[in-house]
Image (cartoon, rainbow, N blue to C red):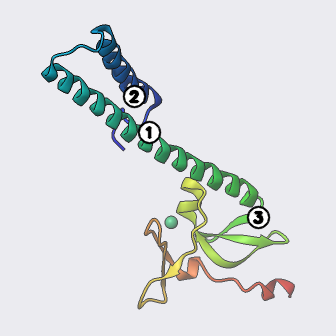
Amino acid sequence: MMPGYGKVDAVLRSLNGATEISKEIRDANFILERLEMKQQLTDLAGYISVAKMELSLLQHSIEEKDQQLLRQAEALAYKGNIKRRGDGYYRTADNRPYGQPYCSYCWEHDQQLIHLHNRVLSNDIRICPHCKNEYQNARTPYIEADLLAV
Ligand SMILES: [Zn+2]
């Protein structure tokens, strides 16, 4: 995202610019040279289109924040049920890890639960589809939930 854009004060600046122009037109009692009028309208349209662009950037950044909040809420809900084992994180049942490992980098870095995948043509390496970190399969095993009952 461009710095200085998608900010409320940037939107207000553009709208103020548009307000200034309409004030100038009004102050001239709506009597302007054709060329001057054309220039004013061009500036007015410019301010409005910048405001529109800034608003859409603002909306985008609000949506990103919403996503982030959602992830954090999810992370909090999971926190007590996620446990590290070897190089991965696992869901737990009765405080014991089971199932497919989650990427420890993604969990520790931004509370995202991303399942590790086996790397194509390799049974020894797992890879995180998100951050591309690689893990040894032996350090991130699949843990059968059934074994917990034993
Ligand atoms: Zn990852």
Q: Can you identify the residue that label 2 sits on?
A: 10
Which residue corresponds to the image point at 47% horizontal and 67% vertical from the top-left? 130
Would you place residue 94 above or below residue 58 in this image? below
Q: Closer to the N terminus: mark 3 or mark 1?
A: 1
Name the residue type under label 2: Ala
Name the residue type under label 3: Asn
Which residue corresponds to the image point at 82% horizontal and 83% vertical from the top-left? 148
Residue 79, position in %: x, y?
A: 73, 58
Q: Residues within 10 Å of mark 3 (few under 14, many from 20)?
A: some
Secondary structure, mark 1, is: helix
Name the residue type under label 1: Leu
Which is closer to the viewer, label 3 or label 1?
Answer: 1
Residue 59, position in %: x, y?
A: 49, 44
Q: Can you identify the residue that label 1 sits on?
A: 55
Q: Quadrant of residue 101?
A: bottom right
Q: Give me the disc on residue 81.
A: 3
Q: Residues within 10 Å of mark 1 (few under 14, many from 20)?
A: some
Secondary structure, mark 3, is: loop
How far apart are labels 2 and 3 at the CA level? 43 Å
